[in-house]
Amino acid sequence: MAISCVRLVIDEMGFMKTPDEDETSNLIWCDSAVQQEKISELQNYQRINHFPGMGEICRKDFLARNMTKMIKSRPLDYTFVPRTWIFPAEYTQFQNYVKELKKKRKQKTFIVKPANGAMGHGISLIRNGDKLPSQDHLIVQEYIEKPFLMEGYKFDLRIYILVTSCDPLKIFLYHDGLVRMGTEKYIPPNESNLMSIFVKTQLYMHLTNYSVNKHNERFERDETENKGSKRSIRWFTEFLQANQHDVAKFWSDISVKELVVKTLIVAEPHVLHAYRMCRPGQPPGSESVCFEVLGFDILLDRKLKPWLLEKTHLNKINRAPSFGTDQKIDYDVKRGVLLNALKLLNISNMD
């Protein structure tokens, strides 16, 4: 299912399919990370859809570690990432933070996830942080308790980014994407619903994962972009404009000034080093054999400030965003992403 939209767009653009390992292929598309040896073997006219070294922001533990470093060195520039701790290594730092909160008589909610968890499994919300086990492999993050709501529902935004070069870094932002809504009306965390996130109705309220919410009987499939549990960002920006919100600032905060560029700056030295190791002798500014379509998951708080979050509310960038299309809106948005990406790469005109 994940490759279906890719195949449809490749057909639409008139590419001729060749065997998977054909050394003459202009475009090589892989659903998983690519071995560095494969990148080293590519001819200059070939393009492959992954960069080496991108795991520095696409693995949630690596991203948390790298963001923590940036927050310490440039705290005013990296305010779009909630505080995050990786257990057991940062257990003591977390407990010190909890003690400081108690001294100041402040109370915060934390979202806790097993380091190897996925699709909402094993997630809980807590307020009493000193009861967390010290040796478990967990990721703990401050929870955004006051999100921007749509019709009473929490939601996140899937933003698509194209990286065409790391030397120099070239980034393109697609001005559409998906709005993915929870399927139970949102109630801020309280003593009665904190630990009951294990109950399905609480999962559907607090988590915006499509993989979670599609199982709720309240999940609404619709063929239009302005109704149902999955909508388009193009519609959402029209909604913001109709309600007198600053749409230009919304996109600027996500792209140029804030989130996307500063996140990719974190990855850039790692990606550049790994790429140069794969392609030694290539002069700076030469055509890159790698490109990458990334999926950023973003939550807006009630002031429309964007926060970099994984769908399960733990920050992560998706380097293999799903191009499956089980609704028309999926096809329309993802087809646009892929068509624009391949046109920007100009692959079809390469010899």
Image: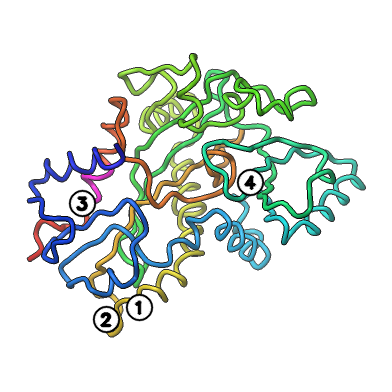
Residue 44, position as x, y percentages in the image? 18, 72
Q: Predominant secondary structure in magenta?
A: helix
Q: Which residue is mark 2?
A: 282
**Amino acid type indicated by mark 2:** Gln
Q: Which residue is mark 3?
A: 342
Marks 2 and 1 in Cβ contact (< 8 Å): yes
Is 239 contained in the magenta span? no
**Amino acid type indicated by mark 1:** Arg
Kindly indicate the quadrant of the structure image that contains residue 201: top right
C-alpha gap between disc 3 and disc 2: 23 Å
In the rendered image, the vertical position of residue 264 relative to residue 118, given as above or below: below
Marks 3 and 2 in Cβ contact (< 8 Å): no
Q: Which residue is mark 4?
A: 114
Residue 318, position as x, y percentages in the image? 44, 49
Q: Which residue is mark 1?
A: 276
Point out the residue furthest to the bottom here: 281
C-alpha gap between disc 4 and disc 2: 41 Å
Marked residue nearer the N-terminal end (2 or 1): 1
Marks 4 and 3 in Cβ contact (< 8 Å): no
Mark 2 Cα-neighbour bin, 10 Å: few <14, some 14–19, many ≥20: some
- Residue at (80, 26) in percent of width and height: 191
Residue 11, position as x, y percentages in the image? 12, 42
Kindly indicate the quadrant of the structure image that contains residue 230: top left
- Residue at (26, 69) in percent of width and height: 288
Start-end of magenta stretch: 337-342
Element type where label 4 sits in the image: strand
Marked residue nearer the N-terminal end (4 or 2): 4
In the rendered image, the vertical position of residue 258 relative to residue 124, given as above or below: below
Using the image as rendered, state which of residue 192 and residue 170 is in the foreground: 192
Marked residue nearer the N-terminal end (3 or 1): 1
